[in-house]
Image: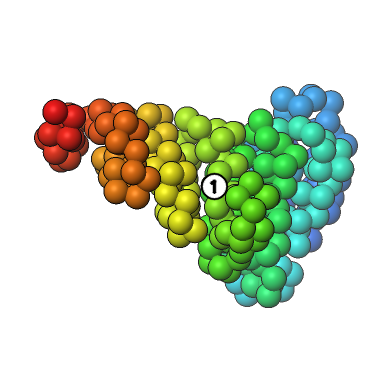
C-alpha cells in the first residue's frame, strides 16, 4: 500500500477500509445500518473505530482527518448522548484535539476531558479524563478560586480532588493523591496534604511513594499532631525503606 492510499483509508460500517472520499457515506451507513443492534454495538463500533483511526493520522493530508473524527463524534453524541460509546468518543476526541495543531487545542481538550467527568461520571474513561485535564491545567498554570478553601489555588488541585473523591481506588488515583498533596502544600494546607498522602497509603498500601512516611512527617513537623503522625507511621509497610524508621517513631 502506498502512502497516498494509506492516508485515505477509513473504516466502513462493515469493517472494511474505504477511501476518504467515501467517509461521509461510511458515517451515514454506520448511523443508519448500525443502530439496530442497540447500545451494545456502539463500543468498538464504526463511529468509535473512525475516531480511533483518526488518532493515527499523519500530517500532510489534503483534508485533515481530525475534521472527520469531529464530525463522527458529533453524530454519535447526537444519537447516543448518554451512552458509554458517547463517553468514549468524547475522550477520544479530547485526545485528538490535544495532539492537533489548532491554537486553542489545550483549552479545547481541557473542556472535553471535563465533559467526560461532568456528563459521564460512571464511565471508565472519567478518572483518566480528570487526570489529563489536571495535567493540561498545570501546563497552562491555571488558577481558580476554590470554594472549599476560599482561596486561589492551582486549578489542577480541584481536578485531582474530584478524581480521588469520586474514584478513590482507581489506578489513576494513586498519582492523583500525591499530586493533590503537593498542591495542598503549595497553598500551605499541610493537614490536607498529609491526609491525601495517608489516603494514598491506605488505598494503595504497596505504593512506591513512601506515602505513609511522608504523611507522618507532615503530621509531626507541620501539623503538630502526634497522634495522627503515629497513625500514619503505623501504615508504613515492611517493604518500605522507611519501615525501621517508622517503627522507631512508634516506640
Residue occupying image coordinates x 55% and y 52%:
157
The answer to whether one can see residue 105 in this image is: yes
Where residue 110 sits in the image (x, y, percent)? Answer: 66, 57
Where residue 207 appears, as percent x and y from the top left, is 31, 37
| Residue 44 on image: x %, y % | 65, 36
Figure label count = 1
Q: Nearer the viewer, residue 182 or 204?
A: 182
Position of the N terminus, as image quadrant, is bottom right
Say if 134 sits above or below 218 in the image.
below
Which residue corresponds to mark 1? Answer: 160
Q: Quadrant of the C terminus?
A: top left
Q: Is residue 154 left or right of residue 88?
A: left
Q: Position of residue 51 (x, y in %)?
A: 68, 50
Image check: 64 left or right of 197? Answer: right
Q: Report helix, strand or loop for mark 1.
A: helix
Q: State the residue in front, 36 or 137.
A: 137
Residue at 72 percent of width and 47 percent of height: 115
Q: Height in image: 121 above or below 109? A: above
Instruction: Report the front residue among 129 and 149.
Output: 149
Q: Residue at x 56, y 44 (%)?
A: 161
Residues 19 and 153: in front is: 153
Q: Is residue 72 above or below residue 43?
A: below
Q: Residues within 10 Å of mark 1 (few under 14, many from 20)?
A: many
Amino acid at each position: 500500500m502506498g502512502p497516498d492510499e494509506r492516508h485515505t483509508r477509513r473504516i466502513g460500517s462493515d469493517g472494511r477500509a474505504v477511501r476518504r472520499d467515501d467517509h461521509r457515506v461510511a458515517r451515514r451507513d454506520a448511523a443508519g445500518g448500525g443502530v439496530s443492534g442497540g447500545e451494545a454495538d456502539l463500543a468498538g463500533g464504526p463511529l468509535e473505530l473512525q475516531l480511533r483511526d483518526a488518532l493515527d493520522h499523519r500530517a500532510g493530508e489534503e483534508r485533515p482527518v481530525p475534521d472527520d473524527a469531529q464530525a463522527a463524534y458529533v453524530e454519535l453524541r447526537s444519537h447516543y448522548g448518554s451512552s458509554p460509546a458517547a463517553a468514549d468518543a468524547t475522550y477520544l476526541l479530547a485526545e485528538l484535539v490535544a495532539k492537533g495543531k489548532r491554537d486553542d487545542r489545550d483549552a479545547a481538550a481541557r473542556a472535553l476531558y471535563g465533559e467526560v467527568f461532568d456528563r459521564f461520571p460512571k464511565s471508565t474513561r472519567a478518572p483518566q479524563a480528570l487526570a489529563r485535564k489536571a495535567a493540561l491545567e498545570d501546563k497552562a498554570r491555571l488558577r481558580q478560586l476554590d470554594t472549599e478553601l476560599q482561596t486561589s489555588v492551582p486549578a489542577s488541585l480541584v481536578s485531582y480532588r474530584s478524581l480521588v473523591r469520586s474514584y478513590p481506588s482507581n489506578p489513576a488515583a494513586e498519582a492523583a493523591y500525591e499530586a493533590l498533596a503537593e498542591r495542598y502544600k503549595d497553598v500551605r494546607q499541610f493537614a490536607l496534604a498529609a491526609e491525601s498522602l495517608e489516603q494514598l497509603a491506605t488505598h494503595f498500601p504497596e505504593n512506591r511513594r513512601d506515602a505513609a512516611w511522608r504523611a507522618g512527617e507532615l503530621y509531626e513537623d507541620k501539623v503538630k499532631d502526634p497522634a495522627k503522625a503515629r497513625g500514619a507511621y503505623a501504615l508504613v509497610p515492611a517493604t518500605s525503606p522507611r519501615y525501621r524508621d517508622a517503627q522507631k517513631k512508634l516506640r
